[in-house]
Amino acid sequence: MRAAGRRAPALLVLVSVLLIAADHWITLTPLRAFGSGVYGSLENVTSSVTRWASDARRLETVERENARLRAEVLTGRRPTAAVAGAAAAYQVVSAHAIGFGGDQTVTLDVGTGSGVARDMTVLNGDGLVGRVVQAGPSTATVLLATAPSSSVGARLETSREVGLVTGVPDRGLLRLSLLNADAAVRVGDRVVTLGSENMRPFVPDVPVGSVVAVEGTSGALTRTALVRPFAHFSTLDLVTVVVGPGRPGDGAPQ
Amino acid sequence: MRDPARKPAGNPAGRALLAVALVLLAPVAQVSVVNGLGLPGGGPDLVLIGVVTLGMVLRPMAATVVGFAAGLAADIAPPADHSIGRHALVLCLIGYLCALVPADSSAGQRTAAALGGTLGGALLDAALAGVLGDESWTSVLGGLPGSLAWTVAGGTLVAVALVSLLPRRRRFGGPASRAAARGHYTGGHHA
C-alpha cells in the first residue's frame, strides 16, 4: 500500500512534467479543444443562468441605451463614431465574456464555429479589448490589452505619432512608448490602434484609451506615457470580434 | 484498501462524488464566478483549496489522482493560457502531501497541514509560472501578496471546517481504532 501510494505520485509528476514539456514544444491543440468543449460549455451554461436571472434589469438597461442611441442618431451626434465606423467596415461577430482568467484573459462564447480564429481584434462599445489567442470549437480566449505580455501598435489620434502600447501589471493601465523621443504628448490625448498587416491581429483606428500621465523626459531614448483604457476590463460583457474584412451583406467568412 | 481505519472520512460514494464535483465544477466556478467578481487580490483558488480539503480525507493514491485531474482541468479550462500540466504537477504533489497527514492527528496538526498545503501550493505554482515563462517575474511577484492572502484565508477555512467536522465522526472509533491506525501505519512502512 505504501509503495503503491508512492509510485502513483511519482508517475503523475512525471506525466505532468511531460505535459509541460510537450506543451512547450508542440501546442497541445486537441487537449485545449477538449477543455474548450467540456469546460467552455459549462461556463456557457453558468453564464447563461446568471444572465437569465438578471434579464429584466438588463432589458431595461438595453431599452434605455437603445432610446439614447436612437436620439443621438436623430440629432446627428455620434460620440462613438470611430468604434461604430470600425465595426461597420468589417465582418464582425458579437460575443459574451463568460469566464475570467487569473492572468488577464477572458473566455468568449464564440469559437471556430462562428469563424473566430487566433489573432483577431476584440473590441466593445468603449474601445479596444484585446486579441484572440486561442480559438476552440465553441469558445475563444482573449488576451486583454492590459496583460503584461500584450503589446499593441498604436498612434496618437491627433498627431499620428506611432508607438507601442503594453500592459502595466496590476494597475489596469497601459504604457505607451512613442518611437519618436521628441513627440509631443499631453494628458488627455487619445490613443488609437495603428493596425497590423492584413488586419491581424489588430485593425486600425480602434480607440484604446487616453493619456493620463507623461513619463519620459525629452532627452530619453523613447517617450512614454501612461494610458487609461476606454474599455472597463473588470465588467466586460458584450464584445465584438472582427473576423475579417468585407462588405456588409457578405456571408460569414470561411 | 487494507487499512480502512486510517482514512475513514465519509462513505466512499460521497467522496467519489466530491472528487468528481471538484474536477468538473471547481474550474468553472473559478472562472465564471470568483474571477468575475473582481475581488482585490484576485480571489481564492477554489481548485487548490478543494484538493487540500479532499487530500485530508482521501488515501494518498486517490488524493494524488484527484489532484492531478483537478489540476489538469484547471490547465485546460478556458481562458487558461499557461503551460498545460503546471497545475496538474503542483496539485498532484499537494494532494499527495495532504493525504500523508494521518486522519487521527490533532486539530492543530490538521490546521497546520491545511495551511501548509494551500500556502505551499500557491508558492510552488507562482514559482513555476515564473520559471516556465508563463508570466514575467514582476507580475508573479506583484500578484503574490493577494493570492497568498486569499490562500491563507481559504486554508484557514478548510482547517476550521475539518476540525469541526472530523472529531465528531471519530468518537465511534475511539482510542482503539487510533492504535490500530498507528499499527498499520508503522507496519506498512516496513513493507
Image: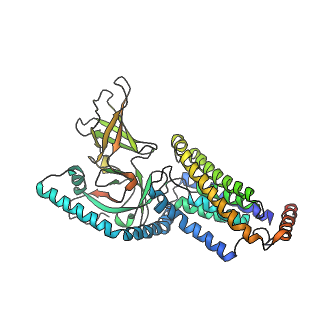
Residue furthest to the top: A219
Residue B153, picture quadrant: bottom right
Quadrant for the C terminus of chain B in the image:
bottom right
Q: At 49% from the left edge and 59% from the top edge, which residue is drawn?
A: B34
Image-quadrant location for residue B145: top right
Q: Is residue A237 visible?
A: yes
Q: Is residue A193 left or right of residue B18?
A: left
Specify whether A102 is left or right of A179.
right
Q: Residue B186's x, y, as percent?
A: 86, 62
Percent of width and height locating residue A131? 38, 52
Name the residue at the left extreme. A75
Q: Nearer the viewer, residue B35 or A64?
A: A64
Q: Position of residue B108 (x, y in %)?
A: 73, 56
Residue B118 horizontal/vertical position (percent): 64, 54
Q: Can I make out residue A13 in this image?
A: no
The residue at 51%/49% (across/down) is B41
